[in-house]
């Protein structure tokens, strides 16, 4: 596949514009509203939190994605989650969509809504209504506009998160670009994260949804920061067909190319969430190989990245492999610990910590040096088959406690 990674975000695809502004929702005066707009109607796909407690925007978007014939805009605010807000919260979604639709001259049913921030507070509609005209006026397909939008959806994130690629489908150039936010309250089956991906590919609604659901399973659902799943998790994928490629209606070569490109973008965004975990100093990658099934490998990998003891050991640069093996042992996946080979690696090198279930004569000093990098990989071979899976997380630091002890203040 001829995939080119490009500098871009939600405006990388033809026909998409974006904007970001400070509407006064956040107390600190930072940007807190973003708008994504397509000049032509889009097919829409979405995946949402599995938490029983679902925020009003999640319920609104689930309905729009399932029942609206097309979508053209996404409005997102940060600072207030609009979760556990009852009928008033649902009314706020409708009012936001109606006002955005009026400004953009599209139906309210073509407007998706997303929120992130503090749970339990009502959306300040006065600020939302002040921000929407500014966003509509500032819409642009420029690189700067995408950056402004990516900054506007951040909460405890320390950096904006974007990714974009270029591929060829049916002889036409196609783009996929996206932005996301997420730093804490992150765990498999979607995390406290919002992700918005746009593409100018021409693809059927059914295959668009199938592609999104398939890539989410191996990307966002393989990220864990702190073991908490959120009320607001949403991934939205919009396709406006502006590239003019032959419509993808079946799972042939073009569909596979699109699927792989979408996976790349979503994996890049997912890893950026893990790397920016609240208070973290290192990205933690866990890779299980030699598994009997993909599910077994995924379960083991996620258990490692979710283990607080393992995460704390990475923060302390301590090659405490017993914590890793223990996390694998309580994962619920069956394996023989006496067959496990365990390795750690980073930009500083790679060493084997265990061979067939027992410790090797590795150098503690070398292990500490490897674990002192800002990206660390744990690799376990369980010698049961050919399947493998990778999960991402981060170390657990004092900073995580500091951030979450006074999140609302």
Image: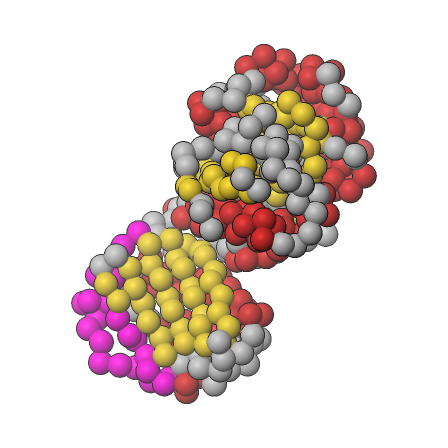
Name the residue at 58% across, 70% down: 295
Can residue 98 be seen from the camera position used here? yes
Of residues 80 and 65, the one drawn nearer to the viewer in this rendering:
65
Residue 151's place in the image compared with 283, above or below, is above
Of residues 307 and 252, the one drawn nearer to the viewer in this rendering:
252
Image check: 307 left or right of 44? left
Image check: 53 left or right of 197? right
Name the residue at 66% across, 45% down: 248
* Corner quadrant of residue 320: bottom left
Q: Residues in magenta?
A: 351-374
Name the residue at 40% across, 73% down: 380
Name the residue at 49% across, 27% down: 146
Q: Whole-percent x and y of residue 302?
A: 51, 64
Q: Whole-percent x and y of residue 299?
A: 54, 69
Residue 355 belongs to magenta span:
yes
Can you name the residue that lies furthest to the front here?
Answer: 171
Can residue 34 be seen from the camera position used here? no
Q: Whole-percent x and y of residue 7?
A: 40, 34
Colour mode of the rendering? secondary structure
Q: Whole-percent x and y of residue 180?
A: 52, 39
* Label tally: 0
Residue 241 belongs to magenta span:
no
């Amino acid at each position: 596949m001829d995939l080119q990674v490009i500098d871009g975000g939600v405006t990388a695809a033809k026909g998409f514009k974006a904007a970001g502004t400070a509407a006064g929702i956040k107390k600190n005066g930072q940007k807190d509203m973003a708008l994504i707009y397509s000049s032509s109607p889009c097919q829409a796909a979405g995946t949402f939190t599995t938490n029983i407690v679902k925020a009003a925007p999640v319920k609104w978007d689930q309905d729009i994605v399932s029942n609206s014939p097309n979508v053209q805009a996404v409005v997102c605010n940060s600072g207030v989650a609009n979760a556990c807000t009852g009928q008033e919260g649902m009314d706020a979604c409708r009012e936001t969509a109606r006002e955005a639709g009026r400004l953009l001259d599209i139906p309210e049913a073509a407007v998706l809504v997303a929120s992130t921030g503090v749970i339990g507070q009502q959306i300040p509609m006065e600020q939302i209504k002040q921000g929407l005209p500014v966003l509509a006026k500032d819409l642009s397909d420029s690189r700067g506009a995408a950056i402004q939008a990516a900054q506007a959806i951040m909460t405890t994130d320390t950096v904006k998160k974007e990714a974009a690629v270029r591929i060829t489908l049916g002889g036409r150039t196609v783009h996929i670009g996206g932005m996301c936010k997420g730093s804490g309250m992150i765990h498999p089956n979607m995390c406290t994260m919002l992700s918005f991906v746009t593409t100018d590919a021409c693809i059927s609604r059914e295959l668009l949804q199938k592609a999104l659901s398939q890539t989410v399973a191996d990307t966002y659902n393989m990220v864990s920061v702190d073991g908490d799943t959120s009320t607001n998790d949403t991934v939205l994928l919009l396709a406006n067909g502006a590239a003019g490629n032959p419509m993808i209606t079946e799972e042939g070569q073009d569909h596979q190319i699109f699927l792989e490109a979408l996976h790349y973008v979503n994996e890049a965004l997912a890893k950026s969430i893990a790397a920016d975990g609240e208070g973290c100093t290192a990205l933690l990658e866990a890779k299980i190989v030699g598994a009997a099934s993909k599910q077994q490998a995924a379960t083991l990998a996620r258990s490692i990245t979710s283990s607080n003891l393992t995460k704390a050991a990475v923060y302390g640069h301590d090659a405490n492999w017993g914590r890793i093996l223990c996390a694998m042992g309580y994962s619920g996946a069956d394996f023989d610990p006496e067959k496990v080979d365990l390795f750690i690696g980073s930009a500083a090198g790679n060493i084997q910590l265990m061979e067939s279930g027992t410790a090797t004569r590795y150098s503690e000093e070398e292990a500490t040096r490897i674990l002192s990098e800002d990206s660390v990989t744990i690799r376990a071979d369980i010698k049961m088959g050919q399947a493998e899976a990778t999960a991402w997380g981060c170390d657990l630091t004092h900073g995580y406690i500091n951030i979450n002890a006074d999140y609302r203040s």
